[in-house]
Amino acid sequence: MSRSLPLAVGFLAGVGVFLWLAGAVLEAQFGPAAILAAYGAVALGVACTAYVTVRRVERLLGSGSGDAPATAGASGSERGEGVTVELAALDVEREVDQLKAERSRPDDGERP
């Protein structure tokens, strides 16, 4: 995520400059459809930039992270990673217990 905002802004700037410099040539050579496609690329760049910016702002403000109250005092990276690792460990443990319970059941002798 740390490289996505510069990538989105760079893409947007590159397509915008290309369209500004080569717009007349594109329209003369390929018609209005080429300009429309270039404007579509600019719109895609704006959408990517807006998405990444909003996600980064949410992460900085802490409203989009869904933190548990127990981790409110931890720093940003410690909060998300620690909770995720703990939840993943609990999920794995639950699945192992479930598989053990299924294997310990007596077999009816019927196979699908």
Image (cartoon, grey):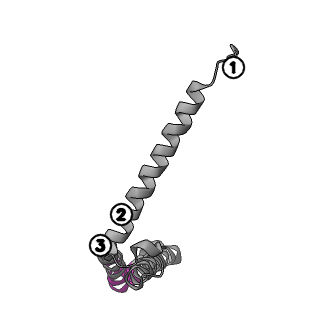
- Position in image of residue 77 (x %, y %): 31, 71
Q: Residue at x 69, y 20 (%)?
A: 112
Q: Amino acid at mark 2?
A: Gly
CB within 8 Å, label 2 to label 3 = no
- 104 relative position to 26: left or right: right
Residue under label 2, please give it: 82
Q: Earlier in the sequence, mark 2 or mark 3?
A: 3
Q: Amino acid at mark 1?
A: Pro
Q: Residue at x 46, y 44 (%)?
A: 93
How would you rate the neighbour count of disc 3 (Cα within 10 Å): few for under 14, some for 14-19, many for 20 or more?
A: few
- Residue span colored magenta: 14-25
Q: Earlier in the sequence, mark 3 or mark 1?
A: 3
Q: Splitting the image into 4 quarters, where does residue 2 fall? A: bottom left
Q: Is residue 102 above or below residue 64?
A: above
State whether residue 97 appears in this view: yes
Q: Secondary structure at mark 3?
A: loop
Q: Secondary structure at mark 1?
A: loop
Q: Is residue 111 above or below residue 60?
A: above
The numbered mark at residue 112 is: 1
Query: Which residue is more in the foreground, 90 or 9?
Result: 90
Q: Earlier in the sequence, mark 2 or mark 1?
A: 2
Query: Which residue is more in the foreground, 34 or 3?
Result: 3
> Of tags 2 and 1, which is closer to the observer?
2
Q: Is residue 24 above or below residue 40?
A: below
- Position in image of residue 78 (x %, y %): 31, 69
- 17 relative position to 90: left or right: left
- 99 relative position to 75: left or right: right
Residue under label 3, please give it: 2
How would you rate the neighbour count of disc 1 (Cα within 10 Å): few for under 14, some for 14-19, many for 20 or more?
A: few
